[in-house]
């Protein structure tokens, strides 16, 4: 990709910030990393921020009086403020640190769900959910005898909005859906959908694992009651994620996990829960990871999420153009207008695992399988697909190498 | 890598010698590899002495799993139940003539797992891995 004269975006300069991207897998075979929807690579500033935390200020947070504890507490809370700003959350108290998107969703299911849902209540999901926004609701449905309904996915890979309106007529108590599909790449029309769900009286939860990393998300504009995402898919460390929740809902919810930090007062047979957000952060949290997450958000803010989105759109358009020209290759999901940087495809007569294996020999990392969205594959009658997922640090040359790798795969199986 | 896709594996994947179903049969079993969606069914006919006279496989999946199934079936015809019970991972890899990492090993071993589960008639026994 040529440096963009207008914005000064220079992908080659950016790649230098990510040490792993220059790794050669074997002599003369440089890595082409196209698996960022699974986890992104990390820039040196994030790795350094975490090292610096351990080298210079490691201490437990919140209770200590000493200098290190104070610095560590500040660093942890500073990260929370940065992340709250990044998603334009009304206040940092509504931003809860969890382990990841999955834990955030489980927190809502177990805390809000157990208190506010009862037998016969309906939870509305979609057919394109990742397992992490499916199984927590299946577990809860079994325990509380809830009904699960699903907004269908059209053959084009979009949510069927007419069916959605009909389902809203059945008065779901909760709508839980993904902002962007990790398989189809579909970006759902959330503003519209959440507003409709709201007027139908449903509480809303958004799985933002694939959205917050890739385009601007403004929670002051979206009617999301809960919004979940993970650091590791947005150039931050593993082991830390966010649950955003509206204050009035969080206040009403019982704690999820019990332990230190989530309490205000403890007696032998009772406790009084701490205030937000600490009520939901039992035990010593992932402090270094929070610091790393803060550095990741700083880095992304410096580039600008609008710029990240723009670069990925150019790259995705390029990938779609090149891939759809390959005979016997089928891309699943919608066209570029409704799609983020995820291109899932299959080759006639060649299993996705074989595709990924041969691409690996060329240094190209793609995902093969169900991508933790098995029901969606069942729906499209696919055993498994290969998925190339992009981030702002990928280049058109890398897409060219993917295309060459696919040609090689087809030649081996010819 | 080229090793993974030796001529033999590609050839058996594209034109298997033992693909099909046997009905009636003495035992039939099927199973999936949930991580990748590989699916294998194996149907076997035995003579009165417990020797495999005919066997076929069906299903879909990657080249490794399908070629492994085809080569496994070839290797068990004429063998006794006891001989089949003694088959293990090394026999499967010998058939394929390759070394495999932990992820792809599951693909290669699925047919043996299916065969043994069918053989024990319980559907609970796992093949060696």
Image (cartoon, coloured by chain):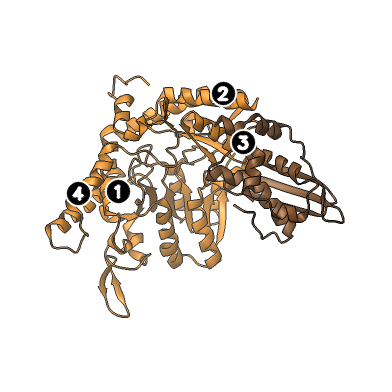
Chain colours: A orange, B brown
Corner quadrant of residue B13: top right
Mark 1 or 2: in front is 2
Q: Is residue A18 left or right of residue A29?
A: left
Q: Does A130 sit above or below residue A341?
A: below
Tell me the chain of label 3: A
Where is residue B94? Give x, y as percent. Answer: 64, 41
Q: Same chain, marks 1 and 3?
A: yes
Circles 1 and 3 in contact, beta carbons < 8 Å: no
Residue B38 visible from this viewpoint: no
Label 1 crowd bin: few (<14), some (14–19), many (20+), radius 10 Å: many
Q: Tag 4 or tag 3, which sits nearer the N-term? A: 4
- Where is mark 3, residue-wise? A351
Tag on residue A55? 4
Q: CA distance from mark 1 to mark 3?
A: 43 Å
Relative depth, front residue between A187 and A167: A187
* Above or below, A202 relative to B97: below
Check chain identity for marks 3 and 4: say if they share one: yes
Please indicate whether residue B2 sits to the left or right of residue B69 in the image.
left
Q: Which residue is mark 1?
A: A89
- Does dot 1 land on a helix, a strand or a loop? loop
* Label 2 packing within 10 angstroms: few (<14), some (14-19), many (20+): some
The answer to whether the residues at label 1 and label 2 have Cβ atoms under 8 Å apart is no
Q: Closer to the observer: label 1 or label 3?
A: 3
Q: Which residue is mark 2?
A: A407
Label 4 packing within 10 angstroms: few (<14), some (14-19), many (20+)? few
């Amino acid at each position: 990709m040529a440096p963009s004269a207008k914005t000064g975006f220079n992908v080659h300069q950016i790649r230098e910030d990510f040490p792993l991207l220059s790794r050669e897998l074997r002599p003369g075979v440089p890595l082409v990393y196209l698996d960022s929807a699974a986890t992104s690579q990390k820039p040196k500033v994030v790795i350094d921020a975490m090292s610096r935390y351990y080298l210079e200020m490691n201490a437990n947070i919140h209770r200590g009086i000493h200098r290190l504890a104070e610095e560590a507490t500040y660093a942890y809370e500073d990260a929370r403020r940065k992340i709250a700003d990044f998603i334009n959350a009304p206040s940092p108290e509504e931003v809860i640190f969890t382990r990841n998107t999955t834990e955030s969703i489980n927190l809502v299911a177990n805390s809000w769900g157990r208190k506010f849902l009862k037998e016969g209540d309906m939870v509305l999901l979609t057919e394109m959910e990742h397992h992490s926004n499916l199984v927590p609701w299946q577990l809860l449905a079994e325990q509380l005898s809830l009904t699960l309904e699903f907004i269908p996915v059209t053959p084009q890979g979009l949510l069927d909005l007419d069916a959605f309106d009909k389902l809203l007529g059945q008065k779901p108590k909760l709508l839980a859906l993904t902002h962007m599909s990790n398989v189809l790449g579909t970006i759902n029309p959330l503003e519209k959908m959440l507003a409709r769900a709201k007027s139908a009286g449903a509480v809303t939860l958004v799985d933002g694992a694939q959205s917050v990393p890739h385009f601007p998300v403004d929670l002051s504009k979206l009617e999301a009651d809960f919004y979940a995402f993970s650091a590791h898919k947005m150039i931050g460390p593993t082991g830390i994620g966010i649950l955003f929740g509206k204050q009035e809902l969080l206040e009403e919810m019982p704690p999820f996990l019990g332990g230190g930090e989530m309490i205000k007062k403890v007696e032998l047979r009772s406790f009084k829960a701490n205030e937000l957000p600490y009520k939901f952060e039992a035990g010593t949290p992932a402090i270094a990871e929070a610091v790393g997450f803060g550095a990741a958000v700083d880095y992304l803010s410096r580039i600008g999420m609008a710029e990240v989105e723009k670069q990925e759109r150019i790259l995705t358009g390029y990938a779609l153009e090149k891939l759809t020209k390959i005979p016997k290759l089928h891309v699943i999901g919608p066209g570029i207008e409704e799609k983020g940087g995820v291109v899932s495809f299959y080759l006639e007569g060649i299993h996705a695992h074989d595709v990924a294996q041969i691409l690996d020999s060329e240094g190209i990392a793609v995902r093969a399988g169900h991508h933790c969205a098995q029901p969606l594959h069942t729906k499209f009658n696919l055993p498994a697909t290969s998925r190339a997922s992009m981030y702002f640090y990928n280049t058109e040359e890398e897409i060219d190498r993917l295309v060459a790798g696919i040609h090689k795969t087809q030649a081996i199986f010819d | 890598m080229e090793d993974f896709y030796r001529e033999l594996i590609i050839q058996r994947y594209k034109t298997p010698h033992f693909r099909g179903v046997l009905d009636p049969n003495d035992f039939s079993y099927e199973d999936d590899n949930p991580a990748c969606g590989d699916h294998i069914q194996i149907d076997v006919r035995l003579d009165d002495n417990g020797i495999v006279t005919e066997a076929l496989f069906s299903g879909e999946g990657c080249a490794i799993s399908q070629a492994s199934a085809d080569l496994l079936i070839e290797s068990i015809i004429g063998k006794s139940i006891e001989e089949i019970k003694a088959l293990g991972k090394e026999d499967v890899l010998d058939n394929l003539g390759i070394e495999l990492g932990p992820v792809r090993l599951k693909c290669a071993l699925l047919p043996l797992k299916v065969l043994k589960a069918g053989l024990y008639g319980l559907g609970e026994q796992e093949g060696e891995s």
